[in-house]
Amino acid sequence: MPYTADSDISSFRMVSSQSTMNTAVPFTSKLCVGDNNVNSDAITLTQGSYAGLFDIYDKKILYGKNIHQQLNPASLTKIMTAIVALKNGSTDMILTATTNVNLKETDAQKMDLKPGDTMTLNQALNILLLYSANDVAVLIAEGIAGSEDAFVDMMNKEAISIGATNTHFTNCHGLTADDHYTTVYDMYLIMNDAMQFELFNEIIHTPEYSTVYHDSAGMDKEISIKSTNQYITGNREMPAGITVVGGKTGTTSAAGHCLVLLSRDTRSNPFISIVMKSDNREDLYDNMSSLLGFIGN
């Protein structure tokens, strides 16, 4: 059932209303559950930002600011792209680029794939999550499902299966489109699902990646990329006592600057933190550091 923050019968509220031994264990028993705003006065974020801090071990929302508001996710979309690919493909499968990788958006992040270029799914996932290449998202989608439309259907079904019912995708990369949205809370659910994959965690923790793929004639093509996550590259200092495992950035004019992180405290307890719709990158990381600094309070 689609959840609503104010509904008494939402399945996301059942976890707080169990009163008898005969009550079925709700879907949310292993998830953080909370209202639209949680401790929202405890941290001051820049104007217009939306954010959430989720304690995975204790299953608590430590902080939330408008976490059920539908927003444009930008390249945070690619976390779901990775999930669907990992669940439905093998990392050594060979993907071949079609003419559909020639995206027309002038400001879209791309690695300039050419029709006929080939690489493994493992290579593609590294480039997707670290460099946020939109043409690689199309390569993955078509390689897994045969078409981007079919792959997006799989993304939406996966979102529903994990409870992200305030999310809808219309593409596999996150470039601005009508009817393409998520929420801070749903991004927590999506990131929580992605964390179950060892390769995903390995990739998002990688500061740099180099590989060789092939063109249509089988000739080698080299690429070297760096993570877009400034905590991982060392361009932004992690708050004291916090280790950032990794995450995913996303930026468009419609979505603003967005970031999802998996972090651990000094006891190795995991936390998911999310900031969306910050006005600029500096504000984004200032907001995220404020969230991470709230861990343990």
Image (cartoon, rainbow, N blue to C red):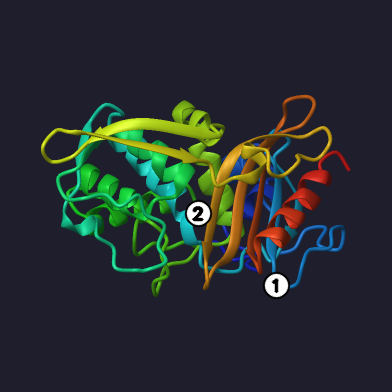
Disc 2: CA contacts within 10 A as few (<14), some (14-19) or many (>=20): many
Q: Residue at x 16, y 52 (%)?
A: 98
Q: Which residue is nearer to you in this view: 208 or 181?
A: 208
Q: Earlier in the sequence, mark 2 or mark 1?
A: 1
Q: Is residue 21 left or right of residue 228?
A: right
Q: Eyeballing the image, is 252 above or below 132?
A: below
Quadrant placement of the C terminus: top right
Q: Is residue 160 left or right of residue 9?
A: left
Q: Position of residue 55 (x, y in %)?
A: 72, 40
Residue type at tag 1: Gly
What label sits on residue 295 in the rendered view?
Answer: none
Q: Eyeballing the image, is 272 above or below 257?
A: above
Q: For residue 44, which quarter of the picture?
A: bottom right
Secondary structure at numbered mark 1: loop
Q: Residue at x 28, y 29 (%)?
A: 90
Question: Can residue 251 be seen in the rendering of this structure?
Answer: yes
Q: Which residue is mark 2?
A: 76
Q: Position of residue 117 (x, y in %)?
A: 19, 42
Q: Position of residue 45 (x, y in %)?
A: 78, 63
What label sits on residue 48 in the rendered view?
Answer: 1
Secondary structure at numbered mark 2: helix
Question: Can residue 1 be seen in the rendering of this structure?
Answer: no
Q: For residue 263, which quarter of the picture?
A: top right
Residue type at tag 2: Leu
Q: Which residue is nearer to you in this view: 168 or 279?
A: 279
Q: Total marks drawn?
A: 2
- Residue furthest to the left in view is 217
Whole-Å distance between the Cαs marked 2 and 1? Answer: 18 Å
Q: Is residue 26 left or right of residue 109?
A: right
